[in-house]
Image: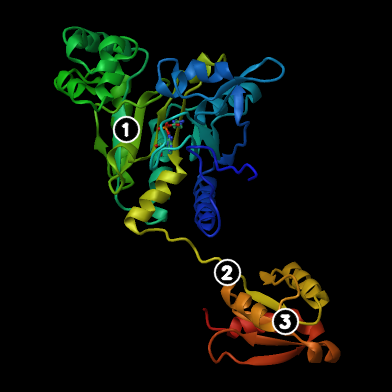
């Protein structure tokens, strides 16, 4: 038996017809982002390992889950575990004018324990906006994500909002939290009992019962915001209300990456299972450009998981896979020259058209024409061939057919399509 292979664990093949929905989602997002002034950024799938180490030394995403490797030239590289760090690296490298607003649709790689909705290669749609700390930009960014969910009919999505403060107020808050946790360290879950000091804020987000109990009355960041952070957080909330975007302030919301400052948010799909219910998240990362060796530059963005969104759509019965159809199907039983030439001609005229291959029988070709969803079949038999004509048949029950001069086939198909009942 020859060796056979499967897609690696934690990865998926996305095939037609399901891929048509994927394609429609990306196209819809490109439209939304484009209308808000965001241009496509297309970067490498791998970066210097250091780019990611800088953004998340204390996070699982970077510490435990990264696909890092040495290339044949001895460089230490990593497959991108998330999209933001690479975009900020590109910003620093190319120094575009600000505000710099970009969107992406790209794969990310995390060595996680695969399960429903959690993959080792997942795909994100996202935006990043660099160069302004105006909280109205936060509102713009959040609204693009909210509009994406709405545009595909996803309703059961909850927006959780928090502020993680900045370099002025966060250290003061951290000290208060450390004091609280130090008195209860022995009560924390197995993981955090020994590691809570590395990133005390993460303990707040821990879902395990011991941590939840030990932090039930812990101080929260939003009670310790400095005046500028408090004002910005207020302005964000005012903006979201003005745009009718529902949200819940979640003072314990701490995201899984280290670079966040001020506004942070997460969208949870209530139709999905708890641990994998995040269909998107993001926030400000005002210190990140400096951390990566660039000029101080504020920034904000989000990433939404394509696979998760589609799972949530399935759970809600929203955004069904669009039917994949062509307009016309050429059936040629005269040897194939006509099918070859007519499909090319019709396609060059902008008509979606398919055909059969391999000299199949009339019956077999008609079956394929039917399955293709085409509204119109273009038939070429010996009679048509010698008369220089084609038969144009409307595929719907009782649709009728007409002869057309072969030279006139484009107009004939267009006419038949205009008259054909949608199938
Ligand atoms: P993240 O929360 O790690 O943020 O990922 C964003 C979204 O990607 C999640 O909400 C989820 O929908 C999806 N996702 C993450 N991991 C997986 C996985 N293993 N399998 C399936 N889907 C997954 C970021 O990555 C930040 N870069 C977002 C951001 C952009 N912040 C600022 N700008």
Q: How is the image coloured?
A: rainbow
Q: Position of residue 149 (x, y in %)?
A: 39, 50
- Mark 1–mark 3 distance (CA, rounded to whole Å): 58 Å
> Looking at the rendered structure, which numbered label has been put on residue 411?
3
Q: Mark 2 points at which residue?
A: 325
Q: Closer to the camera: disc 1 or disc 3?
A: 3
Q: Name the residue under label 1.
A: 235
Contact between marks 1 and 2 (CB within 8 A): the answer is: no
Q: Residue at x 22, y 10 (%)?
A: 176
How many residues crowd around disc 2 within 10 Å: few (fewer than 14), some, or many (20 or more)? Answer: some
Q: Which residue is drawn at 61% across and 78% down?
A: 367
Tell me: residue 185, above or below residue 14. Answer: above
- Mark 2–mark 3 distance (CA, rounded to whole Å): 20 Å
Q: Where is residue 191 in the image (x, y as percent from the top left)?
A: 29, 17
> Callout 3: helix, strand or loop?
helix
Q: Which residue is drawn at 18% across and 10% down?
A: 186
Query: Could you tell which of marks 1 and 2 lies nearer the N-terminus?
Result: 1
């Amino acid at each position: 038996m020859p060796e056979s292979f499967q897609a690696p664990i934690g990865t998926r093949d996305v095939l037609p017809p399901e891929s048509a929905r994927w394609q429609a989602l990306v196209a819809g997002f490109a439209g939304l982002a484009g209308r808000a002034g965001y241009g496509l950024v297309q970067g490498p799938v791998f970066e210097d390992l250091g780019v990611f180490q800088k953004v998340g030394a204390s996070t699982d995403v970077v510490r435990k889950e990264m696909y890092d490797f040495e290339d044949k030239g001895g460089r230490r590289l990593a497959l991108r575990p998330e999209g933001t760090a690479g975009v900020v690296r590109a910003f620093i490298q190319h120094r575009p004018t600000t505000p710099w607003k970009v969107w992406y649709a790209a794969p990310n790689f995390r060595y996680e324990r695969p399960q429903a909705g959690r993959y080792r290669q997942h795909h994100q749609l996202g935006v990043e906006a660099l160069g302004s700390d105006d909280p109205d930009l936060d509102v713009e960014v959040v609204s693009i994500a909210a509009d994406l969910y709405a545009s595909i009919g996803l309703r059961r999505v909850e927006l959780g909002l928090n502020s993680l403060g900045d370099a002025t107020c966060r250290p003061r808050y951290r000290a208060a939290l450390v004091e609280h946790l130090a008195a209860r360290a022995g009560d924390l879950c197995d993981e955090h009992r020994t590691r809570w000091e590395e990133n005390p804020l993460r303990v707040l987000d821990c879902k395990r019962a011991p941590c939840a109990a030990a932090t039930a009355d812990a101080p929260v960041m939003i009670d310790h915001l400095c005046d500028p952070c408090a004002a910005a957080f207020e302005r964000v909330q005012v903006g979201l209300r003005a745009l009718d975007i529902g949200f819940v302030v979640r003072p314990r919301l701490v995201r899984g990456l280290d670079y966040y400052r001020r506004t942070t948010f997460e969208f949870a799909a209530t139709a999905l299972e708890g641990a994998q219910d995040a269909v998107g998240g993001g926030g400000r990362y005002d210190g990140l450009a400096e951390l990566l060796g660039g000029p101080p530059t504020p920034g904000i963005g989000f990433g939404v998981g394509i696979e998760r969104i589609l799972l949530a759509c399935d759970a809600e019965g929203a955004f069904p896979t669009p039917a994949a159809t062509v307009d016309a199907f050429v059936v040629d039983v005269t040897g194939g020259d006509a099918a070859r030439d007519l499909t090319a001609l019709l396609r060059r005229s902008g008509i979606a058209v398919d055909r059969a291959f391999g000299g199949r029988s009339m019956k077999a070709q008609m079956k394929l024409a039917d399955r293709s969803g085409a509204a119109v079949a273009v038939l070429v038999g010996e009679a048509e061939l010698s008369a220089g004509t084609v038969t144009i048949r409307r595929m719907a029950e009782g649709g009728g057919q007409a002869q057309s001069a072969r030279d006139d086939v484009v107009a004939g198909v267009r006419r038949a399509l205009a008259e054909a009942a949608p199938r």
